[in-house]
Amino acid sequence: MTELLQLIVNGLVTGSIYALGAASISLVYGALRIVNFAQGDYVTFGAYAALLVNLHWRGGMVSATLFAVAATAALAVALEFVLWRPMRRRGAKTMGLFITSIGLAFIMRASILFIGGNGERSFRVDVFQSYAVGGIRVSEPQLIAICVSLAAILAVALVLSKTSFGRAVRAISDSPDLASVAGVDVDRTVVAVWILAGMLAGLCGVLAGLVQSSFDPNLGFTLLLPLFAAVVVGGVGSPYGALIGGLSLGIVQEVCTWSGFFGGVNPVWKPAIAFSVLIAVLLVRPQGLLGRARTL
Amino acid sequence: MTSRPRLLGLGAIALTIAIAATAAAASTRSSSTRAATPSFQLRIGTIMPFTGDLSAVGPSLNAAVQLGVDTINQTLTRLGLSNSISVDLVDSQDDQTQTQPAIEAATKEVKVDKVDVIVGTLSSTSTIAMAQGVTIPNDVVVISPTASAPQITNLKDNNTVWRVLPSDTFQGRALAAAGATVFGRHATVNVGARNDDFGTALQALFIKTWKARGGKIGASVNWDPNGTTFDTEAQKLVSGNPAGWVIIDYPQTFAKMGPALVRTGKWSPSKTLMTDVMSVPASLKQVGRQATVGLRGTAPASLAPTYPQVSAFAKLFKKKESKFPATGYEGLSFDATILSFLAALQGHSASPNAIKANLRSISGPPGIKVTYLNLAQAIKDILAGKQIDYQGVFGPVDYDSHGDVGSAIFKIWKYDGKTVSTIKEFTYSSQ
């Protein structure tokens, strides 16, 4: 029983990271119809921005996180003006924007590698400390990851459902043309979406770096596949969907190794199990758990 | 329309020139076989992990190849042979310690740079992928400085894949011997390994040897190096109550796995054995003190510094390539470079066929023992048709019929938090 609880906690930790990154991707795709292959590198950028404050300017983790969130949001906005808006003005559609994002991903990863170096980096936190709560071992970074991720996604969900800005976002995700006819400032809303997505991605990077105890420029890229899976499982466009998708993937991955589950799957099969769940969900409910059924 | 007589005249002149040229060539050939100076340019390409899991060692081993190339060219210039023979490092590519980039790098070096020899890569998985995908079909020689997985021994490679570090069949036995020394022969041990060719093969070898010697295995766990979190695997690895652990991993992944193990509260590095790549001080510092102080492990040892070429090379590397940290494994890629040159020299050609046909004979007995310190003499001996036996700066080499080195010295190393020291050494021979 303790083993199962421990595995569920492990799954919540992994799932929280997935959920944050998935919320970021889901927001961008839902509102802007961009499959952003570079989102993983936004996550890596956030981690390295926090590293800059934490290591070089000797700031604490809180200020490092705030800086990372702000910096990634700023990067997202800059890229909107420099890359995405010009591409959209030239008539680029889903496929063209996807290919663009692949190129952007490589450029960002190479830049981070060039500036940050190829070695493993860690924040100045104690990665070896853990607490025993009942029979379960959990560490401070892990608890923080779970709580912060939950809080951030709930905040985003509230913003999207309760504020007029949120209404505008939902309007442009349905149809940008109709939304602008109805009086929504599409360009400003798009920038705001990028700010939100950038903030989520930066936060995801910091938490992923904390939870993994060390990271390199491939941090976000190796996360990308599970992030997309979480988006699809949860349903595109819904932050609650990203939360459910991320957490369920994380928990399924870890719990499948439980010895009470037919002796436990060998941990190397964790990604395979996670993606089997993805396929099962797609077969039964193609729009994802919380997505809206739509005809394409 | 040209007139017939003119055509005939031109034809006669062409024929005369052709006959004269052939006669001249024949006479020079008969006079040059007496001197027999070959003429070739050996094109070497390197594929090393400049990023990724093994990036702590990649740049240094690449620098050692450049050092080897420079040493050879300087010696050739001193002998007055640099007009006809030269060695060039035509390209260095990054395999990111992954398979797909290794294959792309090899494709570029084989098809675009037209290399004769590839020195690389460092991880077994990348080497096997690159060999099977690119170099074996294209008949290019590969000398890997450090790929140690046993699968490479019997690879169907047309004699093109060679390596300088001993196969892990030796390291499996060394790990078992070290385990017996540290834990006791009949102890129960938990084994953990990264999920790739190197990790799973060595894990299987260790388990087989350990059980055959009367030991017991508790838990055996593998992990995906690209995983997001490692706590589940760490918790599985510390289950039961083993006398100790044998862990097979690379530094950058262990930088995540090690802290996860410490957080379980049930693991201690002083009760753990790891392998060669972890014995590099830079790698150990990357992981963090609490996961590494007291750590022990096995590693292939180079010949003792009392051998002149070993200490001379260490000084040379420090002097010429001071930008790169000395990991202790630079000698391997340096030897790979010298070996490929000597083989090409004996084969009188830089073609991969000539190199692979001669690598074995220049690397081991019979022959005059030479090192890089008397490279000039070695070149003269080969050109005079004599047999040589190259003694490397890491090991004596002595290739067997599979392209593996024939004997190996292993050591048990220990990290006390500041330096890595040797506790014990033992020698294995496949003969």
Image (tube, rainbow, N blue to C red):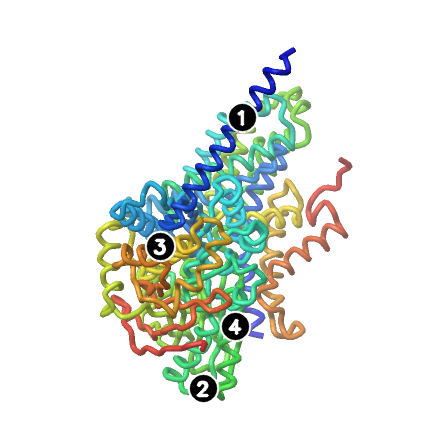
Q: Tell me whether circle 3 and circle 1 mark residues in contact (CB < 8 Å).
A: no
- x, y (%) of residue B135? 54, 51
**Alpha-carbon distance for marks 2 and 4?**
19 Å
Q: Nearer the viewer, residue B322 or B113?
A: B113
Q: Name the residue that disc number 1 marks.
A: B14
**Alpha-carbon distance for marks 1 and 4?**
83 Å
Query: Are the numbered discs 1 and 2 placed on the same chain, yes or no?
Result: yes
Q: Name the residue that disc number 4 marks.
A: B236
Q: Residue at x 55, y 73 (%)?
A: A3
Q: Tell me whether circle 1 and circle 4 mark residues in contact (CB < 8 Å).
A: no
Label 1, residues with CA under 10 Å away: few <14, some 14-19, many ≥20: few
Q: Earlier in the sequence, mark 3 or mark 1?
A: 1
Q: Residue at x 62, y 72 (%)?
A: A264
What label sits on residue B383 in the rendered view? 3
**Alpha-carbon distance for marks 3 and 4?**
60 Å
Amino acid of disc 2: Ala
What label sits on residue A189 in the rendered view? none
Q: Earlier in the sequence, mark 3 or mark 4?
A: 4
Label 3, residues with CA under 10 Å away: few <14, some 14-19, many ≥20: some
**Alpha-carbon distance for marks 3 and 1?**
38 Å
Q: Nearer the viewer, residue A236 or B45?
A: B45
Amino acid of disc 4: Lys
**Alpha-carbon distance for marks 1 and 2?**
86 Å
**For the residues carrying marks 1 and 4, which lies nearer the camera in this image?**
1
Q: Name the residue that disc number 2 marks.
A: B187
**For the residues carrying marks 2 and 4, which lies nearer the camera in this image?**
2
